[in-house]
Image (cartoon, helix red, strand yellow):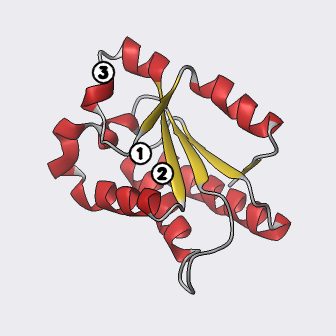
Amino acid sequence: MSRWLGAMLVAMAFGVAAADDARLRYAELSPADPAALADLLARIEALSANGLPNFEPIVIVVHGPEAPPVFLRRNYSLHKPLVDLAARLDGLGLADFRMCETWMRENGVGRDDLAPFVDTVRFAPEEVRRLEASGYVRF
């Protein structure tokens, strides 16, 4: 049920952002699961189907109990296709991944434990507020 709800929320947010033609977008994954993350990344990849779109990278703020383990180096072999897609989207400037340092500290995760393309932010909810104050809209 939660996987379905997460996919529906991502789909609704995608429709709103596309209708606005917003140039600054973010997505928040908390909590999420690998399937919801895969759906989000597939939607971002679809935006580049006809060439690279003209917008800033979609900031993906990751925190909560389920999504972060996908981006841990030790779990790469478990989530290789998903991590490779995320790294490709980051490399193309379509996505910008940011992990919550508060979650990391509470779960004994260090910066070196993360995939190299994942940046960190002090506190995810604060980062979301900062993005919204800067003109970002939910993707």
Q: Is 133 placed above or below 77 here?
A: above
Left of 117 or right of it: where is 64? right
Residue found 22% across the figure and 39% down from its top:
73
* N-term mark: 3 or 1: 1
| Amino acid bearing label 2 | Arg
Looking at the image, can residue 97 be seen?
A: yes
> Could you say which is closer to the camera, residue 123 or residue 33?
123
Q: Which residue is mark 3?
A: 110
Q: Residues within 10 Å of mark 1 (few under 14, many from 20)?
A: some
Q: Secondary structure at mark 2?
A: helix
Where residue 44 appears, as percent x and y from the top left, is 54, 66
| Amino acid bearing label 3 | Gly
Q: Is 73 placed above or below 10 here?
A: above
Residue found 72% across the figure and 37% down from its top:
131
C-alpha distance separating marks 1 and 2: 7 Å
Q: Secondary structure at mark 1?
A: loop
Left of 23 or right of it: where is 50? left
Q: Secondary structure at mark 3?
A: loop
* N-term mark: 3 or 2: 2
Where residue 4 appears, as percent x and y from the top left, is 52, 55
Q: Which residue is mark 1?
A: 33
Label number found at residue 3 = 2
| Amino acid bearing label 1 | Asp
Looking at the image, can residue 1 be seen?
A: no
